[in-house]
Structures are given as structure tokens and as C-alpha cells.
Image (spheres, rainbow, N blue to C red):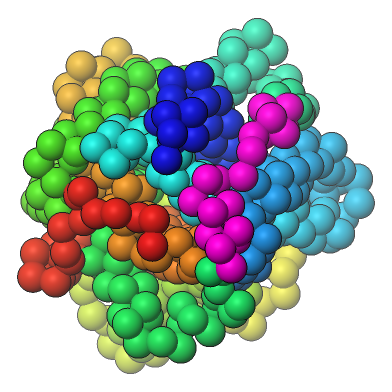
Amino acid sequence: MTDTTIGSRPRMGLVLTASAAGTVFEWYDFFVFGSLTAIIARHFYAGAGDTQSYILTLMTFAAGFLVRPFGAIVFGYIGDRTGRKRAFLVTITLMGLATFAMGLLPGYATIGVVAPYTLVAMRVLQGFAVGGEYGGAAIYVAEHAEANRRGARTGWIQASATVGLFLALSVILVSRTLLGEEAFVEWGWRIPFLLSLGLLVISLWIRLKLEESPMFQRMRDEGRQSKSPLSETFLQWKNLRLVLLVLVSTLMAQGVVWYTAQFYTQIFLERVVKVEPRIVNELVLTVTLLSAPLHMFFAWLSDRVGRKPIILFGLLLAAVSTIPGFQMLTDAVNPGLSAAAAATPVVVIADPANCSLQFDPIGKSRFVTSCDIAKNSLANAGVPYLNEAAPSGSVAHVRVGGVGVSSFEGSALDPASFARDKKLFDTTLKTTLTKAGYGAAADPARVDKVKAILILLVFIVAAAALYGPQAAALVELFPTRIRYTALSVPYHIGVGWFGGLLPTTVFAINVATGNVYAGLWYPVIIATFSFVVALFFLPETRGRSIDT
């Protein structure tokens, strides 16, 4: 193989730029929607009430993740049968048009109940297209890279995710600042979605300059293509075993660890401990700037010490740091909340049979018992609470220190009556909590930004160590003929399902237990399980030939 085909500087620069551009675009879309969840809820689910509208918007967000594996199947087949470049062009076009369209969608006030359905449709289209994006980018770069620099080369793909986050938050922050919060909430939130059209044009222009991957082209010339990549991947045990291994040893954990570090931290800071959105954006932007070199460093290091040690380090750090890290984060940004919880504990006194596990991955369940109403309100207020059993059939109430606030039974109420009683309960509860020291928002003057950034960096280091060498490791595990399919499907199950459902799962556990940190056992348990599996079963792949 000549230097002009693999590893030459001019060609490698184009390959990296084209591949990274699509990944930047993918993550830009993701973070724009994720960061604007609360605002989108107001415009598309206005008829559902504050709490339920937010949950429904999270479900809409998750819908894009749920369809990712199906996109991976379709585009994996295209990539393995007809070429990496063709799949590349289709995925980025669909993804870009869906994102741009979100900025044009009329809201609930304009078209009523049709509005959320159009939003869900665009999220599903986004997710379906993204299902073929990451695998194509990682494979295309790896199949061009020199064997001894495969980690460093594919590390650009991983680092570009943080560039997408930075661009998204920068556009949001600048728009918010220039327009003012009122105008931004009213219509300015559309700007980040509309600006994505520029990213689409640039990405397409670059990708049209690409040629087919040299390894795929040679395989096609020699007639070694898989005639049925799906059956070869999932019906042959030697390949299916590898798919299952990377899913449970790496990709499930990568989904929950990365989304905990890069996404749930924003939800926690803004929704649970009530930090101003502007300060949250500043903290996350700062950490993002610092995180890009970390992805590159761990990818580069994996070329020298191996992929497996770096992945194990990331898994272990995530497992031991997540829960104590979030507890320290609360102390850093909202010490008043921690002090109030210690001085005046909150207790929900309810019939246990009246309490549900509020896990609603499709947004169809109604939580209307007195216990569910009380717990839901406290969880959304970011207030930790204890649970105490009450006699069977009794109406739940909340005790704040020595003051009690009665909930209400909503199962027999019509929507208008339920909304009225819920508003009254929330107002009374909020007043009682405020008097007890549970402030409505974190005091900006008491936010320790330096400490918060250092804590967030610990989460980012764990995510970067796991994510940085991942692309090279995945490419090196699978043969060329089925690589696109075999890599993409488990990646999007791990990231899309386990990572995408993280906010909903964490919220449900928090509500059930009354502990705002209890839901974090979800990523901790998965990271710990994956560490054990990776330690004993994941092979080291550094230095393997991938032209097979």
C-alpha cells in the first residue's frame, strides 16, 4: 500500500476533517436539544403542565436514541454492501435537514396537539440518521490510518464530540445574551437549530470530496464483500459473541458514563440544585474546552500502552467518583440546599401501596395518586426526602420540619380540577420549603465555580478515558466485511438505549427513594459491571491488522 493511499498527510487531513465534521454536527444537534429541553417543553407540550411537559420533552429527546440501533442496521448494511462514502452522505443529509426543520416547527399555541407529534417525528428522523454516523466516521478514519497511529487518528472523532457541545452551548449563550432571556425563550431558541444549516452545507461540501475507503475498495475489487452483513454479524456466533462482548464490556458503560458527565450534569445543576442557566452554560463550556485535549490524550496514549488499560481506568474512575462527586457538586454550587436538608429534613408520609415507580419511557403514564404527586413535586424541586409509611388508604402528606402539607388524590379528578389542585399544592409546598431554607434557586454569589469545574473535570476524565480509545478498539475487533454493521449496532444500543434513557431512569429512582443521588447508582452499577467483564474478557487489540 503506497503512502498516497494510507497515512499521507494531505489525504489524512481531508479524511479527518470530513469525518470529524459529521460528528461535530451530530453532537451539536444533540446538545442543542438537550440544553433547551425546558424551553422546548413550554412550546410543544404547553397543555401538559410544567412537570409533565418537561418529562414528555425528555421522552421526545429519548425517542431519537431509541431508533438509533435501527438506523445502525440500515446504514450498516449500506456501508458494508455499497461503501462507506454513500452511507456517510445519506446520514449527514437526513440528520441536518431534521435539525434545521426543528427551528421552523410551529408550537402548541399555533397548531395544538399536532405540534409535539411533528417534534417527535424530527427527533426520530435525527436518531435514525445518527445510527449510521458514528460507525461510518470511526471506520473511515481507521481504514485510512497508519497502524501505529490508529488510536490518535480516531481520537479526532471522539474529540470532535466536545467541539459539537462547545458550538451548541456557545450559540445558545451568545443568543441568550444578545436577545435577553425573554426574547430567547419566546423565539430565539430557534436560532441554534436554524444555524445548523450552515454546518450541513460545510459538512456535505467536504464529504463530497472524499473517495471510498481503500480497504473497502480493495475488498470490493477482490470480491470479498459480505453478501449478507446482517446475518453474518448476528447469526454467526464468532461475530455475535464479539458484538455482545463490546456491548456489555464497553458500550453500555460508555453510554451512561459519557451522558452522565456531559449531559446529566447540566440537568442536575439546572433542575435539581437550581443554578442559573447562564452559570450552568459557563461551567459546562469551560469544562468542554478542557475536555477536548483529554480525549486526544487518551486516544494517543492507547497507541502506546494499549486500548484496554485506558478503558479500564475510565470505567473504574466513573464507578468510584460519580456519587461522591455529585454530592460535592451540590455543596459547591448550592450550599444552602445541603444545609437545609441537614437542619430540616423533609419526610413523605404515605401509604406504600399508593406510591408508584415513576419510570415512564414513552410518556404515557399518569402519576395522580397523593403519594406520586407529593414525590414528583419534591423531586422536581430538587429537595431530598425520607419515606415514612402511613396507614392504608390515607392521603399522603409532606412534613417539613414541624410543618405538614397535605397532598391530594387526583385519580378521580378531571384535567382542569387536577391542574387547579396541583397548582395549589405546589404553591403551598414551595412556600413551606422556602421558609425552611430550601431556596428556590442557588445564590449566584455562593456558587464556587472553581470547585465545581474541578469536580466536573473528574467526570470528564472518566468519560474521556473510556471514549478516547474506543473507536480504534471497536474497529480492530471486527473484520472489514461486516465492520460497519457489527460496530454500529452495539454502539447505538449502548449509547442510545442505556445512555439515552439515563435521565428518565435517574429521575424515576430519585422519586422512588427521595434521594437526589440514588439514581446515580444506575451509571455506577453499569460501569462496575462493565469493568469486571472488560477486565476478564475484553481482548487487547492494539497493533492488530484490520485489513481482513
Relative depth, front residue between 229 and 172: 229
213 magenta-colored: yes
| Quarter occupied by the C terminus | bottom left
User: Residue at image x 42%, y 40%?
Assistant: 1
Quadrant of the rendered image containing residue 501: bottom left
Q: Position of residue 301 (x, y in %)?
A: 16, 34
User: Residue at image x 29%, y 13%?
Assistant: 445
Inspect this view and state whether residue 117 appears. yes
User: Residue at image x 55%, y 73%?
Assistant: 226
Q: Position of residue 248 (x, y in %)?
A: 27, 70
Q: Is residue 297 left or right of residue 342?
A: right
User: Residue at image x 36%, y 48%?
Assistant: 471
Q: Is residue 484 left or right of residue 93?
A: left
Inspect this view and state whether residue 314 appears. no
9 magenta-colored: no
The residue segment tinted magenta is 204-223
Would you place residue 511 above or below residue 191 in this image? below
Q: Is residue 328 left or right of residue 102?
A: left
Prevalent SS, magenta region = helix
Relative depth, front residue between 138 and 508: 138
